[in-house]
Image (tube, rainbow, N blue to C red):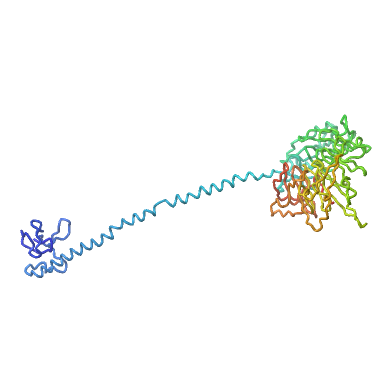
Amino acid sequence: MFCTKCGNEMPDGSKFCTKCGAAFGSTATPKTPTGAATADGAPGQGVPAAGAPEAAATPKKKRGALVAGIAVAAVVALAAVGIAVANPFAAPEPAPEPASAPVEEPAAEPEATDPEPEAAADAEPAAASEPAVPALPAVWFGAHASDGFSLVNEYGNVTVPAVSDAVLKTPFAGGFSLGTWETSEYDAEWDAVHDEQTHYALFDSAGAAAVDLDPVLAAAGITGQSSVSGDVTSYADGRLVLTVIAQEAGQSKVFLVLNEQGGLAFELGKAEEGPLSGWPAADAFHDGVLLARAGHGEEYLLDGSGNVLASSQEAGAPIGSLGCGYYRKDAPDDQKVYGYDGQPLFDAASVNEGDIIGGKLDYDQPGGSGIVAVEAERQNPYGGANKSLAGLYSVGAGAWIVPLGEELDAFSDANDGMLWVRTAGPIGSAASGDGAAAATSGDGAAAAGGDAAGSSGGDAALRSAIVSASGEVVFDASMTDAALTIPEDFRACYLHDGWWGICNDTTAEPYALACIQDGKFLGAIDAPANLADYPNSGMYNV
């Protein structure tokens, strides 16, 4: 048997080790045959350690056996120490798992998702603000064509009329453009006669012949061949003035005023009251008023239904419309603006005060909304030439849009209660700050204040704006995208349905379009090329 403490070989049944004195009673390890294995498969303790087989196999050499026992014990101890040393590093291997656990924590992912709601919150207000910017309405215009006009939208795309032979005779406005075409029908009875017929229709923006006007013309006595007067006209304020010249024997020209749907509003020459004939000019219908001239110098102002608003007979002189509710007399000694009741509302001569003389209504007038152009002179105290003065006065608002002075450079026809002005001085409400507000006298005339005819603008830069009849600036160059390159001193003419053409001093053809609806500027875009001239789109230099 062997000592379990030091490995010393002892006789079987020993109670203690004869080498180290360890007591083991019945716990001593019995002898194991050489080469046999223990129950766990490890070599038996009777198997000598490698490198000392002889020492283990020579029982007679006690000291060699002791050395061998010590070696075995050392090997066992080193193995135990090796396990003990290895285990502290092997056992802590699970320890890094707690350290790796934080790496698996999704704590960072929830933090990454936190900004997403914030980003969404930031985006929502931006999306909500978009409806605040009004969208520009779709629009079509008349453009010059080889024969008549063509129909183009704001991007320059051309709409071809559904009737291939149709020629558009009026620029597109109010939803329609007037078109005509001819047909030839063979008459079998005579075998050689063809009946020529001129047809009339209103074409919509899709190019369809939306309203057949042949029945209207037939009711007015026009059949067979006929033609439209050469003066360019178009829909304005819901009315289209149409002059048709008959080419068949026994027929005469007719003057028709069509309503918004293409129906007959009234016919000049057949009304029971009012003018018996007339030859309205292309721009005769302006601001809801039609100026019709009859024989012997008679002139009438009619509304959209043909009712007489004023006449030259009642006024005692030729008359001219200044917009719905206002007219002037064409008489050198009368520089007043009148209402339809014949009462004076403004007297241009009322600006004469101090060194200001010669106040009168300008020959060129905006013609709408009761806005009038006034001219006068500042008398030279040294006997030289006087200085010319000009201003724009709103009769309805009772105030100067552009005060009387040397600054006013140009203006346009008034449409939709607005007009274009260019001046080196103040505009609208800013004018009152210079003491340019008009003072109304007891007889309804207005006088310019002492500073109304202020000093010359000198080298002051010109500024343009589209203003309302009350003097509010509705549009100027600062309101547009810089890409349109609209200068401060642009020119502007009215086209139709709230659209204004922006042009320059060298050409009247618009290069940009500004849309104003219900007195509010909606936006500006590039203009399609070759746009047609529209009635009541005049621009006048002072």
Residue 502 coordinates in the image, percent (x, y): 76, 50
Q: Quadrant of residue 13?
A: bottom left
Give 363 or 35, whichever is nearer the viewer: 363
How far across and how far down the image is residue 378, in percent? 88, 53
Residue 459 left/right relative to 138: right
Identify the residue at horizontal 90%, vertical 49% (top origin).
Answer: 357
Residue 354 in the image: above or below residue 239: below
Q: Is residue 131 above or below residue 478?
A: above
Q: Which image quadrant: the N terminus?
A: bottom left
- Please state if 61 lies on the left or on the right of 377 as rendered: left
Query: In which quadrant of the rendered view does residue 386 lie?
Result: bottom right
- Give residue 112's position: percent from left, percent from top: 47, 51
Which one is nearer the viewer's eye here, 184 or 348?
Answer: 348
Q: Which residue sits furthest right?
A: 296
How far across and how far down the image is residue 213, in percent? 79, 35
Q: Nearer the viewer, residue 166 or 95?
A: 95
Q: How many marks?
A: 0
Residue 440 visible in the snapshot: yes
Looking at the image, which residue sits at the far top?
272
**Residue 192 seen in the current view:** no
291 is higher (above) or lower (below) than 38: above
